[in-house]
Amino acid sequence: FAKLSKEKVEKFRNNLVDQICKESGGDCEYTGKSMKDAHKGMKITEAEWNATVSALKAALDENKVGENEQNDLIPAIAPMKDDVVEVKPKAKRG
């Protein structure tokens, strides 16, 4: 995100807010791209996905979002992982 312009960061933020609102049962409308289209070619790794989820959890904690609400939200966004993560971990040879 550090390389994005202020305008792109703001657009991302607004889309993320709308998407989280929608996924958590709110009456918001998400008008952004599908997760697959939005992340195509970005070569996002599972580690980057996990870091993003950790950052989201920290933001929820910082904003005093309740544990029950967090426990509802995180599983709601989990199915997006397959559309976001393009670089799958390599199978260990054994």
Image: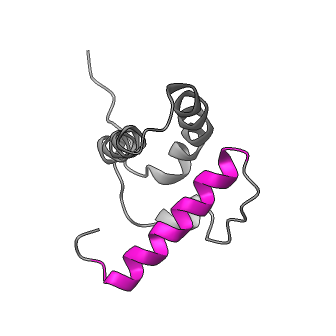
Asked where in the image residue 62 lies, by quadrant, the reply is: top left
Which residue is pictured at 30% across the width and 41% down the height? 47
Name the residue rendered at 43%, 38% in the picture. 64
Q: Determine the residue located farthest toward the top in the rendered image.
A: 94
- Is 30 located above or below residue 58 in the figure? below
Q: Residue 93 vs residue 87: left or right?
A: left
Q: Position of residue 37 (x, y in %)?
A: 57, 67
Closest to the observer: 83 or 22? 22
Residue 36 sits above or below residue 33 on the image: above
In magenta segment, residue 75: no
Report how many numbered discs are placed on residues in the image: 0
Up/down of 92 relative to 62, above or below: above
Dominant secondary structure of the magenta stretch? Answer: helix
The N terminus, quarter of image: bottom left
Q: Residue at x 61, y 62 (%)?
A: 18
In the image, residue 23 lies at what x, y percent? 66, 48
What residue range appears in magenta?
Answer: 4-25
Direction front: furthest residue? 64
Using residue 81 as the reference point, say whether residue 87 is left or right of it.
left
- Residue 50's spot in the image, x, y percent? 35, 39
Q: Nearer the viewer, residue 5 or 28?
A: 28
Residue 10 falls within the magenta-colored stretch: yes
73 left or right of 23 in image? left
Quadrant the C terminus occupies: top left
Q: Position of residue 46 (x, y in %)?
A: 36, 41
